[in-house]
Amino acid sequence: TPKDSINLATFDVNTDWVFQKPVSATPQNIASIQQVLARRTSLGWTNLEAAFASVMKMVEPGTHVVYVGDGITTVGDADPVALGKRLQRLGDG
């Protein structure tokens, strides 16, 4: 509902946000997000660590983050256990 706030980040190597900060979930803002998704072409690279670092800067306590992807990083150290530890440190900070 418009009482909720939303934003969308897409990422490969870089993380791009649709809005500078979360916005009301109005029909117009939802349409903007849908347009970005419809035009999006995947580059095939995935820098999960950089994406989640960007997410951590954007969110506030109580924010729900929904990640849609395969969870496989292809940039830097691709070891999933090492990635999990790095992401945990991001959350701890």
Image (cartoon, rainbow, N blue to C red):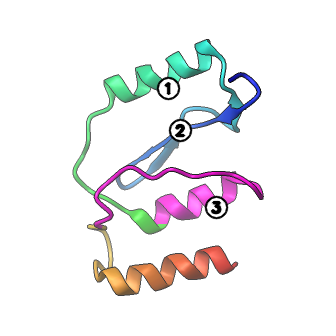
Q: Earlier in the sequence, mark 1 or mark 2?
A: 2
Locate residue 26 relative to residue 41 in the image: left or right. Answer: right
Q: Position of residue 36 (x, y in %)?
A: 42, 26
Residue in view at x 31 percent, y 67 percent: 73
Q: Quadrant of residue 76?
A: bottom left
Residue holding disc 3? 56
Residue holding disc 1? 33
Tell me the amino acid under the disc marked 2. Answer: Leu
Residue in view at x 43 percent, y 80 percent: 84
Magenta residues span 50-72
Residue in view at x 41 percent, y 64 percent: 48
Q: Quadrant of residue 21?
A: top right
Which secondary structure type mostly characterizes the magenta part of the structure? Answer: loop
Tell me the amino acid under the disc marked 3. Answer: Met
Q: Of 2 and 89, which appears nearest the observer? A: 2
Verify CB contact (< 8 Å) between mark 1 and mark 2: yes
Q: Position of residue 59 (x, y in %)?
A: 69, 53
Identify the disc placed on residue 8: 2
Q: Is residue 69 magenta?
A: yes
